[in-house]
Image (tube, grey):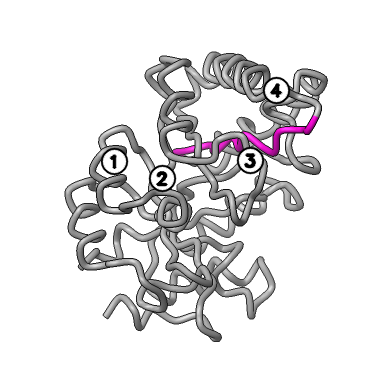
Amino acid sequence: MIDIDRLAANLGWLFTELPFAQRFDAAAAAGFTAVEYADPYPFPAAELQRRLTDAGLVQVLINSPQRGTGTACVPEHIAEFRAGLALALGYAVELGASFLHVPAGIRPAHLSRDRAFACYVANIAWAAQQARDTGVRIVLEAQNKQDKPGFLLDDQAHAAAAVAAIGADHVGLLLDVYHARHDEPDVLAALREFLPRTWHVQIADVPGRGEPGTGDIPWPEVFALLEAHRGWIGCEYRPSSPTGLGWLR
């Protein structure tokens, strides 16, 4: 079984019975030593950093800001993408985040897949240059076709292809076991193939995106693979209310 010291509480999904500002202390009280969340931007970075420090927590990951269905793969929105990326890097540096997830976004109907992919790769290559001396690493994630129809990176191979096309030593995969279970014929085979290129993992069960043990993912085998991986594991699931960690025991 995975040690809780490797688990990061996703404060966008866990402890939602509390106001966001109170979730840091709740995560620490539950035994977490790290947190992640997609959207820090409603709050000043200094305030979030203070809450991290007061709770004794490490910030693992944030997302770059998203407008609508996303700007990262749309050539008409390059200037907006770059402004958002600069904002995100500033937050990531101030919070001490290890990773910045830059979502690919939904491909507009008028845009070919090849052109959208080329735009995304070029934008991430530019982002990698901006992040080179910050200590922040960029991660790219596939999202499943059922929850996110039209998402540009719609399986693990597409996400891995984007990482390979960029070729920077500080761009890697974010592998979400929930998304992988939807789109891969064999989730364990997918983990064996893509974990060597993965820097951050997120977990939730299928169906329902609940906590591990509420669906059909073979968690003992998954956790055995993740034990060898040794990176952070983000808990991005919809928990039983109130939030608990009974599944871990």
Task: Give the number of marks.
Answer: 4
Of tags 2 and 4, the one toward the viewer is 4
Q: Nearer the viewer, mark 3 or mark 2?
A: 3
246 relative position to 126: left or right: left
Residue range (magenta): 98-109
Q: Whole-percent x and y of residue 37? A: 57, 54
Label 2 sits on residue: 175
The answer to whether the residues at label 2 and label 4 have Cβ atoms under 8 Å apart is: no
Q: Which residue is mark 4?
A: 112
Q: Name the kind of residue labelled 3 in the image.
A: Phe
Residue linked to disc 1: 195
Q: Main secondary structure of the magenta part?
A: loop
In terms of secondary structure, where does tag 4 sit? loop
Of callouts 1 and 3, which one flags the residue occurring earlier in the amino acid sequence?
Answer: 3
Residue annotated with mark 3: 151
> What amino acid does circle 2 point to?
Leu
Cα distance between the residues tagged 4 and 1: 29 Å
Q: Quadrant of the C terminus?
A: bottom left
**Amino acid type for the residue under numbered disc 1:** Leu
Q: CA distance from mark 1 to mark 3?
A: 21 Å
Q: Amino acid at mark 4?
A: Ser
Dot 2 or dot 1, earlier in sequence = 2
